């Protein structure tokens, strides 16, 4: 190894341990895990950290919208259970950054999954006609249930509700061999 390669290698190692900074936008927040212990990173700041013993997790905390597309559930329609495709919208804001980013690995997927479960639990088995006629009451029920469910993640639900309900039809059944 010649002197030039040695110096480049030395500089590379030294820059790995030098303090770094991250500019945190006012719409973002996060958590720094300093020696494994979470520490809040405020929004709208310049955050200095030592990469040797600090790992940071930054994400949006401003108001966000999630489109919960096409989930199939069973509802009563014309006195029989019918498969229905349901879509919903969730608008939320992260109010407790520490809870949001230190308790869950993938916050966005966790919020989406919880919201889909709450929507399904709220409307499954209900009468389709009554659900459509009482959409405002159903939306309020979904919003309250989501508020309770997502509170542990530091999330405040702003609005939530159904955006689309469509009955599903089987156009053609393709049977398996031996099925008649």
Image: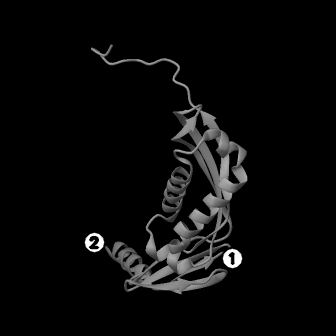
Query: Regarding mark 2 in the picture, which secondary structure is present there?
Result: loop
One can see residue 57 in this view? no
Task: Where is residue 64? Give x, y as percent.
Answer: 66, 63
Q: CA distance from mark 2 to mark 1?
A: 47 Å
Task: Where is residue 9? Give x, y as percent.
Answer: 36, 75
Answer left or right for 42 relative to 49.
Answer: right
When asked about the image quadrant of residue 174, the answer is top left
Q: How many marks?
A: 2
When asked about the image quadrant of residue 150, the answer is bottom right
One can see residue 109 in this view? yes
> How many neighbours does mark 1 have within 10 angstroms: few (below 14), some (14-19), or many (20 or more)?
few
* Residue in view at x 52 percent, y 44 percent: 125
* Residue in view at x 33 percent, y 13 percent: 180
- Does label 2 or label 1 sit earlier along the sequence? 2
Answer left or right for 30 relative to 103.
Answer: right
When asked about the image quadrant of residue 14, the answer is bottom left
Task: Where is residue 124? Give x, y as percent.
Answer: 52, 46
- Label annotation for residue 13: none
Residue identifier under label 2? 1
> How many neighbours does mark 2 have within 10 angstroms: few (below 14), some (14-19), or many (20 or more)?
few
Residue identifier under label 1? 26
Q: Is residue 34 above or below residue 172?
A: below
């Amino acid at each position: 190894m010649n002197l030039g390669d040695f110096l480049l290698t030395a500089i590379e190692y030294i820059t790995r341990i030098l303090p770094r900074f991250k500019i945190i936008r006012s719409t973002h927040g996060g958590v720094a895990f300093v020696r494994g212990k979470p520490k809040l990173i405020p929004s709208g700041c310049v955050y200095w950290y030592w990469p040797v013993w600090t790992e940071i997790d930054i994400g949006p905390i401003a108001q966000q919208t999630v489109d919960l597309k096409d989930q199939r559930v069973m509802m009563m329609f014309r006195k029989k259970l019918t498969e229905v495709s349901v879509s919903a919208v969730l608008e939320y804001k992260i109010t407790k950054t520490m809870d949001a980013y230190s308790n869950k690995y993938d916050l966005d997927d966790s919020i989406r999954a919880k919201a889909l479960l709450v929507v399904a639990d709220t409307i499954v088995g209900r009468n389709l006609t009554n659900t459509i006629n009482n959409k405002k009451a159903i939306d309020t029920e979904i919003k309250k249930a989501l508020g309770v469910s997502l509170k542990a993640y530091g999330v405040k639900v702003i609005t939530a509700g159904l955006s689309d309900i469509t009955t599903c039809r089987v156009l053609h059944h393709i049977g398996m061999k031996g099925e008649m």
